Amino acid sequence: MSKKLLKTCALAIVGIGVLTASAGVANAQSGSRLCGWVAVETAVKIGLLYEARQNDASYTKQCDTAISEFEDEIKKDAQLSAMTWTKIRKKSCEHVGKLGLAYTQSSGNLKNDICNKMEAKKPYKVLKQGNAATTFTKL
């Protein structure tokens, strides 16, 4: 994960009024945990998340690096830093989904395992605005 990539993420979040991203291919596997930051505001829920694999030898390092890099980018942006962020460190996909980032399936039901819409070892911007479907953008 590079600083340039995370800066792009921060800039993309600032323009949350225009959403064009769609969910990607589902590649979640058991043993996934999420690391990053989540901001749950009244109308907008944003996750800057990295799906780490518990069985990787570098699991803790991957997680801590993602948290640190996302935090650096949040601090650099006035709009993002004005939001209230919660650190996510080695939390289950369902736990994070229940924070307000759950996505809507075609049946209209909310699905809490957001890793079903993510690929392991990749950073994502996860965005839920009002009643709209959650969007997942690989960074």
Image: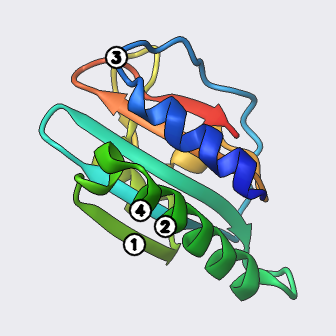
Callout 4: SS: helix
Marks 2 and 3 sit apart, C-alpha to C-alpha, by 22 Å
Q: Residue at x 64, y 59 (%)?
A: 50
* x and y percentages locating residue 92 in the rendered image: 50, 68
Of tags 2 and 4, the one toward the viewer is 4
Tell me whether circle 2 and circle 4 mark residues in contact (CB < 8 Å).
yes
Tell me whether circle 1 and circle 3 mark residues in contact (CB < 8 Å).
no
The crowd level at tag 1 (other Cα within 10 Å; few <14, some 14-19, many 20+) is some
Please state which amino acid type lies under the numbered disc 4. Lys
Name the residue that disc number 3 marks: 17
Q: Which of the 4 image quadrants contains residue 2?
A: bottom right
Q: Residue at x 32, y 67 (%)?
A: 86
Its colouring scheme is rainbow
Tell me the number on the disc at residue 43: none
Comes first in the chain, label 1 or label 4: 4
Name the residue that disc number 1 marks: 87
